[in-house]
Image (cartoon, rainbow, N blue to C red):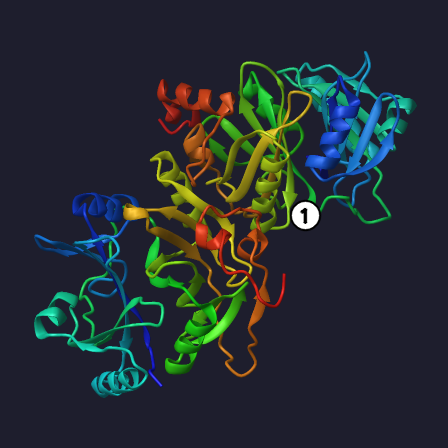
Amino acid sequence: MVELEQLRYVRLVATDLGRAADFAERVLGLGPIDRTRELATFRSDFRDYTLAFVSGDRAVQSVGLEVRYPRDLEAILEGLRGLGLRVEKGSGEDCASRKVKDMAWFMDFSGNCIELVVRPLNSGWRYFPRRDAGVRGLADVILRSVDIERDLLIWTGILGARVSDWAGEAAYLRFDDAHHRIVLLPAARPGILAVEYAVEDVNLLMRNWYTLRDLQVAVVHGPGRRPASEQLFLTFAGPCDVLFSFVAEGISVDERHRARQFPAGPSGLCNWGSECKISEFNDAARVQNGRSITARTGVS
Amino acid sequence: MITLQSISYVRLGTADLDGATKFATEYLGLEISNRSKDSIYLKSDRREHTLCYFRGSPTDQTVAFEVSELSELELAASELDRLGHRVRLGSATEAELRRVRSFIGFQDPTGNHIELVWRPAYSGQRYHGERDAGITGFSHIGLCTTDAARDEIFWTGVCNARVSDRIGDAALLRVDQVHHTIALFPTDRAGIQHINHQVATGDDVMRSFNFLSERQVPMVFGPGRHPTSSARFLYFQGPDGMIFEYSSGVREIADELLYRERQFPFDPKGFCEWGAKPQIREFRDWARPHVLD
């Protein structure tokens, strides 16, 4: 089985590149790297960039994951074709704009675009942002899925990810020593729900909460603590119809970890009792009340 | 020198005993250890009680400290008498009401009612709160002062308190290893400025923030983190305008010889390193610093 190396980046489609870039710098505290008429990228850690805003007719929202060798790429593509998914190799131009050696992409069963890249660029210089938000790096991405059972086949069957825990039907997926890098969340439409950046500790998380208030950024969930990953989180509205979070602390898991079932919706996602304004989470709680979770997990 | 061993209890008068009881149990999370027609005794840790509400004027507020020997009560009484404080020896009935063997009462220079108690009652049963607030115990009070310099001398000179830090002129005083047990806040009145209970974790602070906010309890400061004691905190308003605080992770000062108190600014940054801004008048309008800005 091929293994995913790293979560590398998210590419978001921006209608207003200037506004999105301002958010990345002023609110998220990321450092600007490249800027063209159709692209703006931002650094959060040792990676050259982890957040890209793209505009133009061909722009597609995507999540970028690293695989080690071109042959891994081929093996994954073979597996994806086996599931009947359409896959495509990136051109030299595509690779150049992403600063990678080789790449391919596919659409999952929901219609989310996933990019697989080989040898993405790391930065030789350390990340030094203008605002001291205490960002440590891109931590994870919450991805909507309209067909979670089939999409899980891709992640666990082809990409080698493992389910760390369940919150209702939502699956926390890991492929390194972090509790999760991807969360697949059942929803009525595809797309990235939230991009999550790790900050140093609880003090930075809470300091950012007050900073967001001063910046009049709408907080939609948190500050809180997730029962499954024990991460502290603070989720807020961002550009491109995507939410952003700061997260801190949290457990790491190893091979012995057994996936646990937590409740769907806010009660399974925060044990501080914080207010949740994210409709996907609130809907999930309502769905669960109408159907048994044991049936889904095969316990019955 | 009067050696205060620890803070013992707070007694608060109230015109609405039922309302105060509801707040203390359902919201604050204390446990009723005893009640009579005119008073309610509330438990927060291994002690028999640490808070008592009684029918009376809300301005009738008393804080008690424990001394270790009966003889210290007598020594303290004569020392206070020598300094011109009127000292009152508690009667047996009064001692029974306070669940102590013996006590004396006096007023500090500001006029705060202070009691020194000997052998306060402990409970055989552990504390189990009305709600899971995570309380580990009654820990400290904010005390009003009308002259910060004068009262600092009283608590550190006549008693054994030491200055741990200052926020403007407000001195945070310790009597044991805990960063502060008494915090003197300059204001224009006498009385207890706030009552602190420690909770087990920072998570408990945040859970209570959401729990109490949902129930419309007025939040007056926080959640935040004190740069002085490093404790995570939440201040909210209880009956009769009294400010209650939960905090977790208060610093301990183990080395008396090496520790030096620090001066913090009297502004929101001196009170909170997360960026919370206090809505408490003693944290906003008073304690103008005399040395630093």
In this rendering, would A97 be left or right of B141? right
Residues A52 and B34: in front is B34
Q: Residue at x 63, y 16 (%)?
A: A109
Look at the picture and state if B8 lies above or below A230: below
The quarter in which the N terminus of chain A is drawn is top right
Q: Residue at x 22, y 47 (%)?
A: B20
Residue A214 percent across, percent down from the top left: 61, 37
Q: Secondary structure at mark 1?
A: loop
Looking at the picture, which amino acid does disc 1 mark? Answer: Gly
Let me know if residue B195 appears in the view.
no
Q: Which chain does the numbered disc 1 sit on? A: A
Let me know if residue B290 appears in the view.
yes
Residues A151 and A246: in front is A246
In this rendering, would B92 be left or right of A278? left
Residue A226 percent across, percent down from the top left: 49, 39
Total labels drawn: 1
Q: Quadrant of residue A260?
A: top left
The quarter in which the C terminus of chain A is drawn is top left
Q: Residue at x 44, y 68 (%)?
A: B147
Residue A18 percent across, percent down from the top left: 79, 24
Residues A129 and A230: in front is A129
In this rendering, would A87 be left or right of B37? right
Q: Which residue is mark 1?
A: A134
Quick one: label 1, few (<14), some, or many (20+) residues within 10 Å? many
